[in-house]
Image: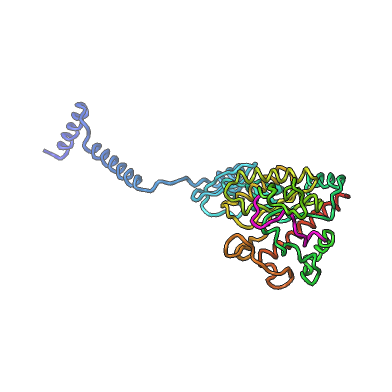
Amino acid sequence: MSRYQNSSSTNNRHNRRRRMGMPDPIMVIGFGMVVLVAVVVWVLASRQPAQASVEPTAAARSTSAATRPAADAAPASTAGSVEQGLVIKRITNTPDPNATVVPTEAVPVTSQKDEPFKRTAKNWENWPVVPEMTTRALEIYREGQKNGRDAHAFSKVGDCESSATWFLEDFDKGPEWYSLGNDYAHLEKAIKYFKGSHGRTSLAARDGARVSTLFTSLWVDPTFCETSENPLTCEYRVHNPAFAIISLGSNDIDDVEKFEAEMRDVIDLTIEHHIVPILATKADDLEGGGRNNQVLAKLALEYDLPLWNFWAAVQDVPNGGLDWDGAHLTWSDNFFDQPGGLETGWAVRNLTALQVLEAMRSGVEASGD
């Protein structure tokens, strides 16, 4: 048989397969190769890391840049910017020097000029040491002048911190007993204005005195007081002051509510006599938590009265100006311009008391009275 016959026979077999629907082996092999290649490509592609984003074309980038904020950036770290008053969180890969970065919760900052310090009884520790003449105090003063009160006189009302001879006494004894220096030379006006009251022994200031002591006739001085008087009314009658520095609380440490009620009585009686009450905080904290000082601040606010915050004045003094017992003040002469001259409780007490008196004097002067 010739090769041509063999070729014809082969063609006949192919024709029979096609007629019978049988696949051509060559086509099968070719199709299999295509499938195999496709599978390999898919497997290799599946192993590549997923891309976070597709790099836009140059045209797309120019279009996007024209429509999005300039501070926008690619993902990575959190930052913020302000747009139309809103805080917007953004994710940036590196810090953008042109972006405005703000906290996610912006807290407005105001100065004391924008929002003045508002006094409350609870923040009494932050009150100024030297008060100003209040509206109510000036009204009381004017009533006192109508009723014959001595504008150049003040009384000391209190315990041992008011009865001690070294409380302001040196300023009536003469310039050799004190030194104001350049910083406090202006206080000479108060010294002269209230001359005679600085060194006077008050009938309403006694060692160990409590608030209730001021209403007890057993504590009066029979040499000067009438039998119907108590120490407070006797002092006000005898000295006839326009002002009263009231410094109490160190011996009233067992009952704060009682202290408040009795202090109200002192304030009311003083006002009834047309005398300006000047309340004073104390340096010690024998009752704990500064509760008595807080009461005094509360009453000063309620009555609109001056509060001499002596406690605040001695906070920078060694041991808060207190002696070893935590109750009495450390002592030194009143030479305020000397080295260490203001490092004791008594020096600071006398200086700030003078400053308070000058504030009252200048307050009256400024009012035109």
Along the viewing direction, whichever of 275 and 49 lies nearer the viewer: 275
Q: Using the rendered view, name the quadrant where residue 221 is placed.
A: bottom right
Along the viewing direction, whichever of 155 and 42 lies nearer the viewer: 155
Most frequent secondary structure within the magenta stretch: loop
Q: Using the rendered view, name the quadrant where residue 193 is placed.
A: bottom right
- Which residue is found at the position 66% from the left and 67% from the top? 331
On the image, the x and y values in percent for residue 152 come to 84, 55
- Residue at the extreme left: 1
- Left/right placement of residue 68 relative to residue 16 reads right
- Residue at the extreme right: 368
Along the viewing direction, whichever of 76 and 70 lies nearer the viewer: 76
Q: Is residue 321 above or below residue 116?
A: below
- Which residue is found at the position 55% from the left and 45% from the top? 89
Along the viewing direction, whichever of 46 and 111 lies nearer the viewer: 111
Q: Is residue 128 magenta?
A: no
Q: Is residue 207 magenta?
A: yes
On the image, the x and y values in percent for residue 273 come to 79, 45
Look at the image and name its color scheme: rainbow
- Left/right placement of residue 127 relative to residue 365 reads left
- Which residue is found at the position 80% from the left and 52% from the top? 238
On the image, the x and y values in percent for residue 319 come to 60, 64
Label total for image:
0
Q: Is residue 257 above or below residue 10?
A: below
- The range drawn in magenta is 196-210
On the image, the x and y values in percent for residue 126 come to 66, 53
Where does the N terminus fall, quadrant-wise?
top left
